[in-house]
Image: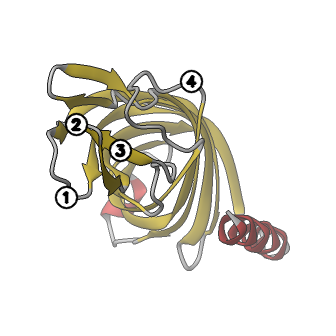
Amino acid sequence: MKNFKHLIIIALMAVFTCGQANAEFRFGIKAGLNVNKLHLSELKQNISSDNQCGVTAGVMTEFTVPVVGIGFDLSLMYTHMNNDIKEGAAEGTVGKNFLEIPLNLKYKLKLPVVSSFMVPMIYTGPTMALKLDKSTFQNLKTKTVQMGWNVGIGLEFVKHLQISGGYTFGMNNLAKKIPVVNNNMNIGDIKVKNNYWTITAAYLF
């Protein structure tokens, strides 16, 4: 959490600095689909989670230094993930609705001839997701905040429409430090990380 706050402060300082150098600021809307899977530590019981689809939508701001093509984007997204989990006949969720805040360092590659209508880009950076609902799976309680790291690529068309695809690596253990009990035996703590693919389209004004 502290590292994420530090990155936001650095980004804001960069915004101010680049603003003095005529950086390009834009705002827009963003939406897409995600496919996520909860990765659980190896334990001697039948707890599992499969790949599941969800949606994401929200607003986005971007600033770029035109000459070098380097900049940041910051988004505020509602993200729905189908975090279903099973243990034998028992089934539930560990939270489905999130307020997600990704902050990405972005590089746009200006190519001769085609850059007027299509610009490739790559991005990477942290994301923080705040859980908005409660877990319904009784044997596993999860934390309110999940942290991740994004990497991705994309294309910008006619200077307004951005299509991108990326992968988010879960960085923190989502499970609270409570033991799981199976057949009245303490078998240890579960470690859970949420990894997911995301495909989005953004229109910037």
Residue at the spot of label 1: 42
Residue 104, horizontal then vertical, whole percent: 54, 62
**What amino acid is at disc 4?**
Asp
Residue 129, horizontal then vertical, whole percent: 56, 44
Number of residues whose C-alpha sits closer than 10 Å to that of mark 4, classed few (under 14), some (14–19) or many (20 or more): few
Looking at the image, is mark 1 or mark 3 earlier in the sequence? 1
Q: Pick whichever, 124 or 190, lies toward us.
A: 190
Q: Looking at the image, do the residues carrying marks 3 and 4 touch, with CB atoms under 8 Å apart?
A: no
Q: Secondary structure at mark 1?
A: loop
Snapshot quadrant of residue 86: top left
Residue at the spot of label 2: 183
Residue at position x 35%, y 44% from top? 180
Which of labels 3 and 2 is toward the front?
A: 2
**What amino acid is at disc 1?**
Glu
Residue at the spot of label 3: 180
Tally of marks: 4
CA gap between label 2 and label 4 equals: 29 Å
Is 138 placed left or right of 52 in the picture? Answer: right
Looking at the image, is mark 2 or mark 1 earlier in the sequence? 1
Residue 205 in sight from this viewpoint: no
Q: Give the label on residue 133, or none.
A: 4
Q: Secondary structure at mark 4?
A: loop
Residue 85 in sight from this viewpoint: yes
**What amino acid is at disc 3?**
Val
Q: Give the label on residue 195, or none.
A: none
Residue 88, horizontal then vertical, whole percent: 14, 27
